[in-house]
Image (tube, rainbow, N blue to C red):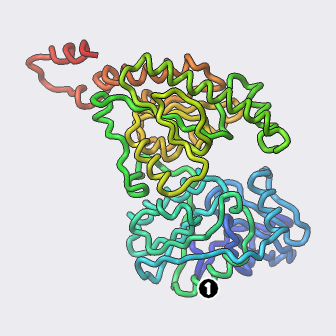
Amino acid sequence: MIELFPTTYNKFVCPECNYADIKINKIVFPGLHIIADCSCTNCKFEFLHDMPIGHAVYYPVILGKGNKHLYGKDIYRWFHKAFLNSYLNQTQSDIRFVKKQMKVTPEVIILNCIDYLYGHVLLKLFNAQYYIDNFPDKGLIVLIPQNFEWLVPKGAAEVWTVDIKLSQARNWYNSINDKIQEELKRFDKVYLSLAFSHPDFSKIDIAKYTGINRFDISKFDKSKPVITFICREDRLWLSSAFWDYLFLIIKDYNFFTPFKYLFIWRHSRRVNKLFNKLNKIIPGATFYLTGMGKKRRCASFINDLREEKISNEIELTWCKIYSQSHLVIGVHGSNMLLPTALSAGFIEILPVSRYANIMEDISAIYKGPLYLFLCRFAPGNPSVRTVSKMTSSIIKHFGRFNLMNSNEYNQHKLYEDVSHFQENYLKE
């Protein structure tokens, strides 16, 4: 964390003259970003600089106030240029801001979870447990979009919710800044959480966020298999990189709507074909479809829980399904964080265009051989046969794998009889 008040973090350098003596005029809270409004004491250049939180820890926005120029070695359109657009088009909308106070503390840590991507909000929120567990003398304040409030873990001192949609989260909201500035007057000392975008999941108890325990791995081969596919109509499992490329081109243009249904049909056909194969290979398995989208034609044995409009109740229902799932399957970007945090294992279909983003939407807690066995990535455009083989292999051979790798069995001690090793192995 870094200090915001009364001593404000200031390790900034003028982007024009590289002078390190910077005056911070004020801190602004327009939404996704927390901004230092700066002046160089040498050349008098005025600029805005991201406070180092969230993605800005790695590539902060630095923007000249007068020349509207973005500074930095790498300028990312999705982050830097989106900020410039929001700054130039500040909204005066009065955003509903609700404060819920659970305890009063003179020193607080603010965790800003506002973001325009579902997964980014969750990744930032997953930092909350660290502060609740390790700084009981300081109150944690979670700043978060209203729709995510149900996931805030117990132990936070305050929750500040803003009533904005994810699609609106990149905007610059003066009303949010005004309300936060008023709230800050109540505290003697204020810190900012760095809100790491990739926390250590092995130290995160997902039950504290969802109220649901993750799959009990000791029961993996003692219960009938449950397999869930997360279906989103903007994250499709297609048969080639060519089809992926075409879909990326047309998906955001209404003119191509008739063509979109062709892509969705091809995706749905593959998912149905996969479940039909698995239904024959794994007798007694239960199959679910979840995710945001229309219910479309599928085999009668598939439980289709897809919804076009999402509510907290629907997400909670899905989370219960994930916690019962031996495997969840989905295309990268299909909101895989909660599913992989709750299920026993996963298979993620990873398009070529997302190779550099591997692991960014995964929150499994395992380490070592167990991770390699239960957590699989199917790169490129894997065939239905490949994914079905991968799925059935995990389900069918977990017991054998566990026998050879579990600490329960691999005990170095004096044995009078080792025949039980062979007996248990032959059961598989």
Number of labels in the image equals 1
Residue 52 position, x and y percent, is 64, 63
Q: Secondary structure at mark 1?
A: helix
Residue nearest the viewer, comparing 114 with 419: 114
User: What residue type is disc 1 on?
Assistant: Glu
Q: Is residue 161 left or right of residue 47?
A: left
Residue name at image x 48 percent, y 31 percent: 302
Residue nearest the viewer, comparing 293 with 143: 293
Q: Quadrant of residue 399?
A: top left
Residue 370 visible from this viewpoint? no
Residue name at image x 57 percent, y 27 percent: 271
Residue 116 position, x and y percent, is 67, 57
Residue nearest the viewer, comparing 318 with 141: 318
Placement of the C terminus among the 4 image quadrants: top left
Placement of the N terminus among the 4 image quadrants: bottom right
Residue 141 position, x and y percent, is 50, 72
Residue lying at the far left of the rendered structure = 416
Q: Is residue 239 left or right of residue 227?
A: right
Residue position for label 1: 182
* Rendered position, 341 above or below 209: above
Residue 129 position, x and y percent, is 43, 60
Residue 221 visible from this viewpoint? yes
Residue name at image x 67 percent, y 68 percent: 31
Residue nearest the viewer, comparing 309 with 8: 309
